[in-house]
Amino acid sequence: MDLRIAHLYPDLMNIYGDRGNVIALAQRAKWRGIEVEVRPYSVGEWADPEWPDVWFFGGGQDQGQDIVGADLAGKNGAALRKSVEGGGAIFSVCGGYQLLGHEYVPEVDPSIPGVGILDVTTRAGKRRFVGNLLVDSPDGQLVGFENHSGRTYLGPGAKALGTVIAGNGNNGEDKTEGAVQGKVIGCYLHGSCLPKNPWLADRLLAWALDRRHKDTKLDPLDDADEAAARVQASEVARTRT
């Protein structure tokens, strides 16, 4: 059995160390005896866009989002949508999350069109949300660190990844954090997210493997260290006002 991971725009959308999400996905697969290959997909002609089982899309500055948004406006965006329609999964954080939506509207500059895979819209706010983020979801708590000025609002096609316990999440108003639509997840959980929240990593692995390997069951792993880190991060996040 093998797993194919695509890292979207690693040269432009990786300012908060979110490459750790790719490492976590790959390592948790390898611990289970699954062969893994990771390939970068950046601006320009994509070779074999039907190859990936799961895509990771990280955060970036507005300038990087301009370039990426323009690239996704063409056939690369169409290829990404086709991949999702064919069973591919996506995990996105911050800027990547925003660009999977309908548009990102900076405070001053022109709107950056998104690829429209997630039914969300983001507008820049005047105050930046920075700090620990604690989220309750139906399947378990999530911890991370948010650093964004975007205010993301969900449309009817997407559902929230979870409810904010501490921090701001999507917009600081409605207590939602992240979005889930089919096998696509967007969030503001830096940290990196997946090493701290292994249950979410395993959900993505299961979705990805199901694309070519049906009825896959993941063997359990010893996540004692990850659980301890999550408890400590949760305690720190709860002190946030």
Image (spheres, helix red, strand yellow):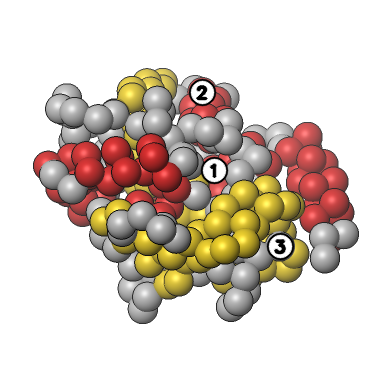
> Looking at this rendering, what residue extends furthest in the left direction?
75
Q: Position of residue 10 (x, y in %)?
A: 40, 28
Q: CA distance from mark 1 to mark 2?
A: 13 Å
Query: Residue 55: percent from the left, percent from the top?
Result: 36, 39
> Do labels 1 and 2 touch, CB within 8 Å?
no
Q: Amino acid at mark 2?
A: Lys
Residue 167: which disc?
3
Label 1 crowd bin: few (<14), some (14–19), many (20+), radius 10 Å: many
Contact (CB < 8 A) between labels 2 and 3? no
Identity of the residue drawn at 26% across and 56% down: 113
Sort mark 2 into few (<14), some (14-19) or many (20+) by Cα contacts within 10 Å. Answer: some
Quadrant assignment for the C terminus: bottom right
Quarter of the rendering containing residue 51: top left
Disc 3 residue crowd, few under 14, some 14–19, many 20+, Cα 10 Å: many
Q: Which residue is mark 2?
A: 30
Q: Which amino acid type is marked by label 1? A: Ala
SS assignment at label 2: helix
Whether residue 136 is situated above or below residue 230 in the rendered picture: below
Where in the figure is residue 12, as x and y percent of width and height? Answer: 40, 31
Q: Where is residue 206, by image quadrant?
A: top left
Q: Residue at x 72, y 52 (%)?
A: 131
Q: Earlier in the sequence, mark 1 or mark 2?
A: 2
